[in-house]
Amino acid sequence: MGPAGSQNAGAIARHPCQSPLVPLPPLTPVRDSLPARTFPFVNYAIIAANIAVFLLENSTVASGVSADRLAFTWGLVPRRLLLDPALGTETIFTSMFMHGSLGHLAGNMLFLWIFGDNVEDALGHVRYVAFYLLGGVGAAVAQVLVQPTSLIPMVGASGAIAAVLAAYAFLYPLASVTVINPVFLLWFFYGIFLHLPAWLVIGEFFVISLWDALANNAQGGIAFMAHVGGFLAGALLLGPFMAGRVRVDRYATWERWARRRGEYGRDQWYS
């Protein structure tokens, strides 16, 4: 399951490409090939915070509070935000750490686990926090703009994670990502796992989200436009957030090594 979209408390989180109108099969990542130079403690802390909030949600519901009431109080309700921004603004951030089901949480955290560490490595720890939160804000703005009168609470980290995916795709487009082969019959020819470039895996996520945002809106409880908004926010924010930072990955390292080897070879040839 990919980043399951923001949803109301009663809806079951689904991968966007489970929509019957989407012609593409899902590409579920398992791991990527890029090591991080620094320990991604911020990314781990965000994952831990999401898990902690989910456990708190469940304990609150177990104590007798209605799940719908909890979602409406702390989730992002577009109409409430527009009518009373002072009261609703905080829910932009609280909703980013809430999830409607274990599957919703697991799908989002899987994507964040795989892709977040390298983005944090590129941006730096402090900038990564701001980038993640602003990505979530961009996702919320997009969803509110397309459904300003909606009274359905929007919860989930997928908007902020979409921003992280955009950053990863632009920073490391050729990084190898291992995904589960989505076509069972092809398992016998290519195996259970496929190794695809990041631009293809993440690009499929964006295309599916955009398609569903335009064709299906929020069927199945998934706020597809939040995915699109988060992704575009991440793409736009990446440049400013990378200001003064040096991009280093195995591809850049390889290019520098090859250039040094070439220069050394020419020097020796003409000496």
Image (cartoon, rainbow, N blue to C red):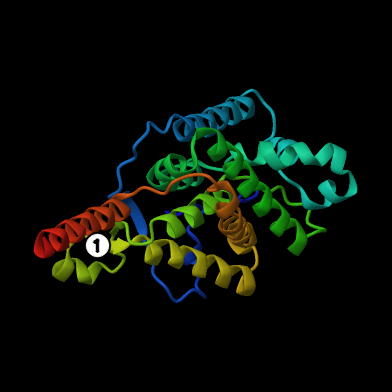
What's under tag 1, amino acid-wise?
Answer: Leu
Residue 214 locus on image (x, y percent): 63, 73
Residue in the picture at 16% in, 59% down: 267
Q: Secondary structure at mark 1?
A: strand
Residue occupying image coordinates x 68% and y 48%: 137
Residue occupying the far top of the picture: 63
Q: Is residue 270 left or right of residue 25?
A: left
Q: Quadrant of residue 142?
A: bottom right
Residue 149 location (% of width, % of height) = 82, 58
Q: Nearer the viewer, residue 34 or 223?
A: 34
The residue identified by callout 1 is 194
Residue 155 vertical position relative to residue 28 in the rendered view, above or below? above
Task: Classify the position of the C terminus by image quarter.
Answer: bottom left
Q: Is residue 246 visible?
A: yes
* 96 or 254, nearer to the observer: 254
Q: Quarter of the image holding residue 226?
A: bottom right
